[in-house]
Amino acid sequence: GADVSDHLRFITSYGTAYHAPTFNDLYFPDFGNPELQPEESRSFEIGFKGYYEADAGEVGAANWSFVWFNTLIDDLIGFDENFDAINVDKAKIKGVEFSYDNRMHQHWLVGFGFTWQSPTSESGATRGNLLPRRAERSGRLDVDYLATRWSAGMTLTAASSSFDDRGNTRELGAWQTVDLRGEMGVTEDLSLQLKVENLFDKEYETASDYNQPGLGFFLTLLYQP
């Protein structure tokens, strides 16, 4: 990386990765494949990061980043139309990612992130198809209010539609969820936390025939001496 100005930095990176199949990938009944090979990948990214801090005596800070990425994968571990584990000879995942976090004044904290990607198979009869269970667009928005003895916030998460198979015939619909959270200090060491997940009880799947959890409430008493 290199600083372009006091508040802007140019970044770039290149890396390789290795991912061995899990025990279940190899031997799970009616799914595993003992002939699986490990994944190997090469990734490149380039982009910018920006940051801002308020002047002395003021409260506020902001950070953002914008990155273009490209990942090439050999022997991607996936599954076929019968849900048997297989290696996809070649795959590519490229796209852009943007994130932003802002501490506004004394109480408000806002952050969001967005990814637009193209995850595709690059070999065989499915060349050009989207890789299973990978949305092309996804994003997240966080808003929190921070007071002296309590805090409250919400998270909006969303993803576009995807496919459950290499042939792109079984579509998984787009989805959005809203989560709420709150915390109140009871004493200096004791606090009460409340979390509400999937507020609107959205029915959605990230894998065919496996529903994600619906509306859920969680109450926690936290002790931190």
Image: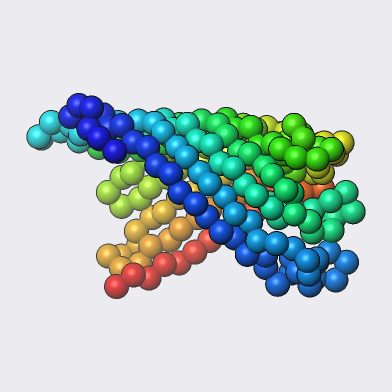
Q: Position of residue 60 (x, y in %)?
A: 23, 34
Q: Position of residue 111 (x, y in %)?
A: 41, 36
Q: Quadrant of residue 49?
A: top left
Q: Nearer the viewer, residue 36 or 169?
A: 36
Q: Residue at x 61, y 38 (%)?
A: 93
Q: Residue at x 65, y 49 (%)?
A: 74
For the view shown, which residue lies furthest in the left direction?
A: 56
Q: Is residue 39 left or right of residue 208?
A: left
Would residue 200 be visible to someone looking at this image?
no
Q: Nearer the viewer, residue 46 or 213?
A: 46
Q: Is residue 33 left or right of residue 52?
A: right
Image quarter of the N terminus: top left
Q: Quadrant of residue 158?
A: top right
Q: Residue at x 55, y 31 (%)?
A: 95
Q: Quadrant of residue 120?
A: top right
Q: Nearer the viewer, residue 128 or 139?
A: 128
For the view shown, which residue lies furthest in the top direction?
A: 5
State the scheme by which the image is colored: rainbow
Q: Nearer the viewer, residue 191 or 78?
A: 78
Q: Residue at x 57, y 50 (%)?
A: 41
Would residue 184 be visible to someone looking at this image?
yes
Q: Position of residue 173 (x, y in %)?
A: 76, 35
Q: Is residue 29 left or right of residue 96?
A: right
Q: Is residue 31 left or right of residue 153?
A: right
Q: Position of residue 92 (x, y in %)?
A: 63, 39
